[in-house]
Amino acid sequence: MKVAAILGTLLLGGPVAAAADRPNIVFIMADDLGYNDLGCNGQQEILMPNIDRLAAEGTRFTNVYAGAAVCAPSRCVLMTGLHTGHARVRDNHGERDTVPASEQGQKNRIPLEPGDWTIAELLRSAGYATAIFGKWGLGEPGSTGVPTRQGFDEWLGFLNQDHAVDYYTPYLWQVEQKLAIPANEGGRRGQYVHDLFAERAIEFLARNKERPFFLYLPFTIPHANYEVPDLGPYANKPWTDLEKTYAAMVTRMDGEVGQVLDRLRALGLRERTIVVFCSDNGAPGTTDGSRFRSGSTFRGQKGTFYEGGVRVPMIVRWPGKVPTGHVSQQVWYFADVLPTAAALAGVDAPSGLDGLSILPTLLGQPQDLSGRLLYWENRRGQAARLGSWKAVRPEYGQKLEVYDLANDPDEAHDRAGEHPEVVARFEAAMTAAHVPSPYYPRETTPTRKAKRKAATP
């Protein structure tokens, strides 16, 4: 049993930190927030004083990558420490013909299984209280993947991404039951359900202030549908309706981040808590081309393996531990979060992970990560980063593109023809990184778009 293995480590005198040395962990993740949507990353139009304050009080990381370019696999990488060449969930939907009969009728979503480790299981076995409020994406109703079967004590939110676009849903999932939202029944729009996540988070903090806790807040903002109760300071802006609504959603989320930060301070937990803020993947095209330039100058957007699809904003604060007002260019990604959480809790991480502890990096200490491979794949294509080199195969059957991110962060110039030795190294490493999954067979027939591109001189 997974938990028994960790309990054995604890009882046998493994690397367990004293309770006073183990920080609380609050991990806040926005949904489809672009790299450039944060003021601290250059955004000048959207007000977010609390997230900017978080950056000023901690370290802002400029070279951090999501686990995938869309939500479900990115969350799987985050929770399990395995990249998408090994993870259980590698895309938003799997292949119908290979999904067990018990999962039919649920749009081929593949749930986590009992043998899969999660951050929550690891931390709960180390004595942490665990909770998730927001969007899960790794298990359908009654499946082995629901949060309370994957290490979480408390849970309220959306189980999948299709449900999560409804900000006025008549129900949410709580533990393993539907929780009715009477104010939204019959088509009414009385409760903006996103607000409930911050409310539950604040209640959880107060109830668990005397013990270590892991609070996971995967907010649904600013994912489409774009809707918000009021436009706030943007109501009279000479902007499009989309721009005003998007900005109001982000600012509303910022206010709720501020509520969490203020409650930590009021409870005397500020210095004992490491707070992380990030996004689950890059921004969609709906906002990338707007006045906000959500994806900055990066190529691509959500759903692609170019920088605009996988490079995400990342802020970490831990007063007295993580450097204040610092900017780090260290390269790391979501697979590193589980082993880092294990190091924070003073327990051994499971073996066989693709991530590694970046605790020295968080603490501002030297850490050589230059020789490691970061890897992404889905049913259509794959990508990897090694040092300053980035390789992208948009679709299987196409040649590998290679970019020198040190000199070309916008991936404008394919250097594959100039550096065959780099291509060969990536080909070998990416082949080794992939373990076939019956749920996600590769699509090797190029799409019509890819065929047209290949035929273009």
Image (cartoon, rainbow, N blue to C red):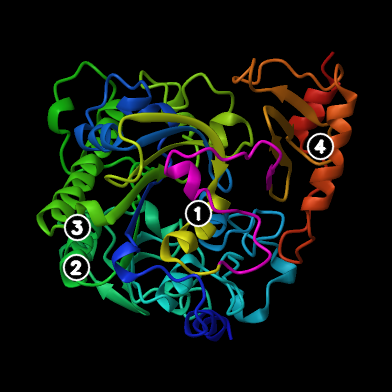
- Residue at numbered disc 2: 209
Instruction: Give whichever of discs 1 and 2 has the lower sequence position.
Output: 2
Q: CA distance from mark 1 to mark 2?
A: 23 Å
Dot 1 amino acid type:
Val
Q: Main secondary structure of the magenta part?
A: loop
From what the image shows, is residue 252 above or below residue 198?
A: above
Q: Are marks 3 and 2 in contact (CB under 8 Å)?
A: yes
Of circles 3 and 1, the one toward us is 3
Instruction: Give whichever of discs 3 and 1 has the lower sequence position.
Output: 3
Instruction: Report crowding for label 4: few under 14, some 14 to 19, many 20 or more residues within 10 A (C-alpha).
Output: many
Magenta-drawn segment? 349-376
Dot 2 amino acid type:
Lys
Residue 302: where, in percent of width, then height? 53, 37
Q: Quarter of the image holding residue 174?
A: bottom left
From what the image shows, is residue 215 above or below residue 146?
A: above
Instruction: Give whichever of discs 2 and 4 has the lower sequence position.
Output: 2
Task: Say the numbered circle drawn on residue 426.
Answer: 4
Q: Quarter of the image holding residue 83?
A: bottom right
Residue 438: where, in percent of width, then height? 76, 66
Q: Are marks 3 and 4 in contact (CB under 8 Å)?
A: no
Q: Are marks 1 and 4 in contact (CB under 8 Å)?
A: no
The answer to whether residue 182 is left or right of residue 383 is: left
Q: Quarter of the image holding residue 51?
A: top left
Dot 4 amino acid type:
Phe
- Residue at numbered disc 1: 337
Q: CA distance from mark 3 to mark 1?
A: 21 Å
Q: Among all residues in the image, which is located at the extreme left?
A: 266
Instruction: Give whichever of discs 3 and 2 has the lower sequence position.
Output: 2
Of circles 3 and 4, the one toward us is 3
